[in-house]
Image (cartoon, helix red, strand yellow):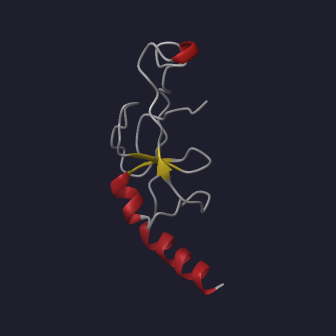
Amino acid sequence: MLELRPNCEHCRTPLPPEAAHARICSFECTFCEDCVALLQQVCPNCGGGFSPRPLRPASRGRHDNDLQHYPASQREVYRPVDLAAHARWLAERQQD
């Protein structure tokens, strides 16, 4: 089950469970769509791509699979990205 983290790791924009602009990588690193654009669609933590974060129903989910029974995480992750270093890493990666 996804953790549904409450904020963008780079800019701290709130990303409540219903946020359509939340993006995650395969390790659940969580960013807003604006920061994902700055990161050139590449996760600075794992190097993977991003996808829209799925939405979990607030209530009445099938088999009680909803926020009422499985609430979103309250744990904030804040790891601002050094955008210049990320750009250098991306450039080096493209040369390989």
Left or right? Give the position of 65 relative to 35: right
Q: How many marks?
A: 0
Compared to residue 22, the image places residue 65 above or below, namely above
Residue pushed farthest front? 62
Residue pushed farthest bottom? 95
Q: Quadrant of the N terminus?
A: top right
Residue 15 position in % (x across, y down)? 37, 37
Q: Nearer the viewer, residue 2 or 35?
A: 2
Q: Nearer the viewer, residue 81 or 28?
A: 28
Residue 48 position in % (x across, y down)? 59, 60
Residue 49 position in % (x across, y down)? 55, 59
Residue pushed farthest right? 96
Left or right? Give the position of 16 relative to 66: left
Q: Quadrant of residue 93?
A: bottom right
Taking the spot 41% from the left edge, 58% from the top edge, the residue there is 36
Q: Nearer the viewer, residue 39 or 50?
A: 50
Taking the spot 46% from the left edge, 63% from the top edge, the residue there is 41
Taking the spot 40% from the left edge, 39% from the top edge, the residue there is 7
Residue 60 position in % (x across, y down)? 45, 13
Q: Quadrant of the C terminus?
A: bottom right
Compared to residue 9, the image places residue 44 above or below, namely below
Taking the spot 53% from the left edge, 59% from the top edge, the residue there is 43
Compared to residue 69, the image places residue 13 above or below, namely below
